[in-house]
Every structure is written in structure tokens, then in C-alpha cells.
């Protein structure tokens, strides 16, 4: 068992390193992904902030929405991670990888870690843009460390979910469609752009079981409100769903070939 754990840790590190090197060779995707959060904050956030239609617990709407837009950015980066698995299968790379003695869990965890690193790049972009827009955020060593942890967990969950989807749908076209169908409802059925309290009761029930809500809640407590009373529970929920998706993803990973 100890040998298996050591293998998973070392191989996950290798897989993550390989994925990160791909990103460093071609950072175009991350630059393009930066456009969407900038538009949300610069246009939607500014416009909604002026009409003051949404209660934001005494903070400006731009402060309130920034953690939600950060969550959305990380989600959109991570949820399409399964495309790389389908591409690797179509290129014949996945077949060669799966015959190696590397634990399947290491492949999944390695890709989750690399998705988290991609998500951290979105954190930096949004922090810079928030500074340009003069959005006051609580930037301390504790808050930054917490944001990095929650971003890694959130990206890990959504990338794991995307790998599970990729093992089911098998084609890039279907995957793209399902990815859009999943991400947009999760985003709007969360506390990203409005408080859960103003939602209808049925939507509140959905938001309360939506992992994205806990990611937003954790980021908002760190960056905006400073109330950390619910932060341990938010992190716990994210850790649990990451554990579940990693185990399920490791089980489903070879099924991409079928």
C-alpha cells in the first residue's frame, strides 16, 4: 500500500509537470480565457453596480462579484480539460500511456494538479484587473494562500468532472456541447453573481448542493467579507467532491478507449 501511494505521488508529479510544460510552450489559451472575466467585471459588473438592484451585504457589487467571476474563470478553464483526453485517444497517445504500470489515479491527479495551476493563472489576471478597476479586496498572506488552495481544489473538481464526461461521451463535439450545458447552469445556479437568499426556493436548494457555490463562498469570505467562520466547511466540501471525482475518474479513465 505504501509503495502504491508513493507511486501515485511521484507519477502525479510527473504527469502534472508534463501538462504544465505544454502550457508554457503555448500560453495562447490562457490569454484568450482572460478576455471573458475582464468583460464580466468591466462591463457586467460596472453596469449592475450602477443600478444597485442586487443586495450585496454592504459591499460594492464589483467586490461582491469578483470571487464569482474568478470561480467562473477557473471553472471554464478546468471543465474542458477532458478534451485533451479525447485528443490523446484520437492521436493514439492514450493507448500507449495506459499500458504503462503507472496507476490510473496518478494520471487523474496529475491532470487535476495541472488544471489547478492553470486556474492560478486566472487568479493573477483577475487580481491585476481588480487593481486596475480599483476593486478593494482583502489581500493578505492568509487570503492569498486560501485563494490558491480553493482555486486548486475547485479546478481539480471540475477537471475531474470533465475527465469523467470525456470517458462517457467519447467525441469532441458531444463533449463541447455537454461542457456548455453543465457550466452555465452551475454558474447561474450558484451565489456567483447574486446572493442565494434572493433566489426562489427551488433554486436555493440547487445552489446549496452546487460545489461551485462553496468555491465562491470560500473566495468571497477571504477576499471580501473577512468572515472566515464558514471557510473550513467550504474547503471540506470541495475536498470531499475532489476525492470522489478523483476515484471515479481513475475508474472511468480507461473507458475512454471503449
Image (cartoon, rainbow, N blue to C red):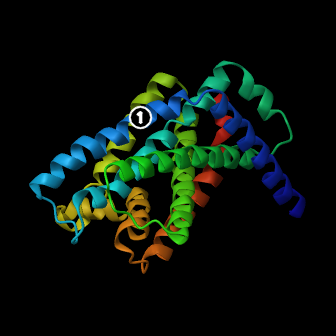
Of the pair 156 and 221, the residue shown nearer to us: 221
Helix, strand, or loop for circle 1? helix
Left or right of 16 in this view: 196: left
Residue 160 at x, y percent in the picture: 57, 47
| Residue 91 in which image quadrant | top right
Q: Which residue is at 67% across, 38% downward?
A: 20
Can you identify the residue that label 1 sits on? 178
Q: Position of residue 159 (x, y in %)?
A: 55, 44
Q: Residues within 10 Å of mark 1 (few under 14, many from 20)?
A: some
| Residue 51 % position (x, y) | 9, 53
Outermost residue toward the right in this view? 3
Quadrant where the N terminus sits is: bottom right
Residue 258, can we see it? no
- Taking the image as shown, residue 196 lies to the left or right of residue 115, namely left
Q: Quadrant of residue 96?
A: top right
What residue do we see at 79% from left, 53% from top? 8
Where residue 151 sits in the image (x, y, percent)? 52, 55
Q: Is residue 43 visible?
A: yes
Q: How many marks?
A: 1
Which image quarter is the C terminus in?
Answer: top right
**Is 97 or 36 nearer to us in this picture?**
36
Residue at the top extreme, as displayed: 91
Amino acid at each position: 500500500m505504501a509503495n502504491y501511494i508513493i507511486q501515485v505521488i511521484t507519477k502525479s508529479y510527473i504527469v502534472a509537470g508534463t501538462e504544465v510544460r505544454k502550457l508554457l510552450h503555448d500560453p495562447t489559451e490562457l490569454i484568450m480565457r482572460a478576455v471573458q472575466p475582464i468583460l464580466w467585471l468591466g462591463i457586467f459588473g460596472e453596469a449592475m453596480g450602477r443600478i444597485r438592484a442586487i443586495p450585496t451585504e454592504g459591499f460594492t457589487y464589483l467586490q461582491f462579484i469578483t470571487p464569482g467571476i474568478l470561480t467562473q474563470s477557473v471553472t471554464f478553464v478546468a471543465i474542458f480539460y477532458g478534451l485533451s483526453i479525447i485528443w490523446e485517444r484520437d492521436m493514439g497517445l492514450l493507448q500507449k500511456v495506459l499500458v504503462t504500470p503507472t496507476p490510473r489515479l496518478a494520471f487523474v491527479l496529475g491532470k487535476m494538479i495541472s488544471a489547478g495551476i492553470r486556474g492560478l493563472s486566472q487568479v493573477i489576471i483577475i487580481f491585476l484587473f481588480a487593481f486596475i478597476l480599483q476593486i478593494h479586496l482583502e489581500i493578505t498572506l492568509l487570503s492569498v494562500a486560501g485563494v490558491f488552495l480553493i482555486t486548486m481544489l475547485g479546478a481539480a473538481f471540475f477537471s475531474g468532472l470533465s475527465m469523467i464526461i470525456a470517458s462517457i461521451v467519447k467525441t469532441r463535439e458531444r463533449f463541447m456541447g455537454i461542457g456548455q450545458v453543465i457550466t452555465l447552469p452551475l454558474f447561474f445556479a450558484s451565489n456567483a453573481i447574486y446572493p442565494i437568499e434572493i433566489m426562489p426556493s427551488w433554486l436555493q436548494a440547487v445552489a446549496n448542493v452546487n460545489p461551485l457555490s462553496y468555491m465562491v463562498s470560500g473566495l468571497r469570505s477571504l477576499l471580501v467579507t473577512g468572515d472566515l467562520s464558514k471557510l473550513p466547511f467550504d474547503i471540506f466540501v470541495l475536498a470531499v467532491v475532489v476525492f470522489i471525482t478523483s476515484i471515479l475518474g481513475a475508474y472511468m479513465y480507461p473507458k475512454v478507449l471503449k
